[in-house]
Image (spheres, grey):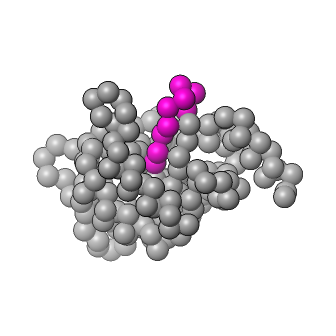
Amino acid sequence: MDHNIQAYVNAFEEGKSLRTICQEFQISDLVLIQALAHKPEITLLGKDYVKPLLAQLPSIGTVMTITEHLGSVFEFKGSFPSGTEGHGYHNLNLHGDGFGGHININNISHIAVVTETMKNNRQSLSWWFIHETGQVVFKVFVGRDADGELKHEQVTILNQWHQKK
């Protein structure tokens, strides 16, 4: 195993967050996910899975969608909007409140399915939409109930995506 890859794996096994590992080693999200793809917590899927996932997300209920840009983090809690395809984009339908936008599906090269244990020993489960440059465009996290527990039906759906490995 490449020396750097082993260092990434060691950092992950020590409990460091994926974000921290990327920052410490100055590597892209994709480089790290590729290094960890053999771990059961990580599934890396190709661009053929982008459209099916975008089609399924609106039906699973309340999720947390996060995007980071230049040190700022934007979060939206709610149902992921449905969309239509046109001119290379997945155009999110904005019906009233919520978020909308246009996802350039041609530039999404991978989907990562990620199960991560956070510092508070709570699990975080998410789908990462990764740009062809290796950076995450946005992440969709499994929702939580009123008690802060992961929604079981969404956990089942995410685990089905892990099985596509």
- Residue at position x 69%, y 41% in the image: 12
Left or right position of 129 against 86: right
Of the 4 image quadrants, the one containing the N terminus is bottom right
- Residue at position x 58%, y 50% in the image: 41
The picture quadrant where one finds residue 67 is: top left
Using the rendered image of the protein, determine whether residue 138 is visible from the camera's viewpoint. no
Using the rendered image of the protein, determine whether residue 155 is visible from the camera's viewpoint. yes
Q: 106 or 3, which lies in front?
A: 3
Of the 4 image quadrants, the one containing the C terminus is bottom right
Up the image or down, 36 lies above or below 19; here it is below
Residue 110 lies, in percent from the top left, at 53, 64
Residue 44 lies, in percent from the top left, at 57, 62
Left or right position of 136 against 50: right
Question: Is residue 76 covered in magenta?
Answer: no
Residue 134 lies, in percent from the top left, at 60, 57
Q: 149 or 7, which lies in front?
A: 149
Q: 3 or 73, which lies in front?
A: 3
- Residue at position x 24%, y 57% in the image: 59
Question: Is residue 125 covered in magenta?
Answer: yes
Q: Which residues are magenta?
A: 118-126
Up the image or down, 160 lies above or below 61; here it is below
Residue 158 lies, in percent from the top left, at 42, 54
- Residue at position x 62%, y 42% in the image: 18
Return the residue found at the far left: 96
